[in-house]
Amino acid sequence: MLDRRATPLILAHLAASRGGMPPPDSQPADAAAAEICYADRDLAPVPAHAWPDHVRDRPRAGTTVRRDAPLCTVLATGADAAETRETLRARATALRTALAQEEAPG
């Protein structure tokens, strides 16, 4: 997912293992990262939620995710590593807040 070059690194690796090597692609201009977001409380059941596009590995509504267990994977891009890490933290915080609001009674 985070290998964003025109020639994926796995294909370059396979070509190299067969004695060839494609020309190197230029480095991406920005940074990309993924981070596992852990549950900060028991979610039993996980509420129905409109998950953002930058979230993968989402639990199904009605399932149980225990505190400190993996909840989902969050993706982000940014100008550099520091900006990308900050975006990951902000997205994870916003997601936990949204889930807490959805599970709170009316």
Image (spheres, helix red, strand yellow):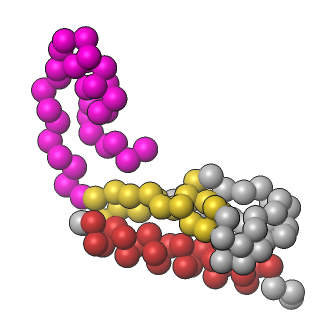
Most extreme residue toward the bottom is 106
Q: Residue at x 53, y 61 (%)?
A: 36
Task: Name the quadrant containing residue 78.
Answer: bottom left
Q: Which residue lies furthest to the top in this view?
A: 18
Residue in the picture at 62% in, 52% down: 57
88 left or right of 38 in image: left
Query: For the magenta stretch, what is the residue range?
Result: 1-30
Viewer can see residue 47: no
Residue 16 sits above or below residue 70 on the image: above
Query: Dividing the image into 4 quarters, which one contains the C terminus?
Result: bottom right
Query: In terms of depth relative to the viewer, which is nearer, 77 or 40?
Result: 40
Could you tell whether 79 is left or right of 101 in the image? left
Q: Position of residue 99 (x, y in %)?
A: 70, 76
Q: Identify which residue is drawn at 27% across, 39% down.
A: 5
Position of residue 1 measured from the top left corner of the image (x, y, whole percent): 43, 44
Give x and y (percent) for residue 92. Answer: 54, 73
* Tally of marks: 0
Whether residue 52 can be seen here? yes
The quarter of the displayed image where residue 53 is located: bottom right
The answer to whether residue 42 is magenta is: no
Residue at 41% in and 62% down: 76
- 22 within the magenta span: yes
Q: Main secondary structure of the magenta part?
A: loop
Query: Residue 95: percent from the left, percent from the top?
Result: 60, 74
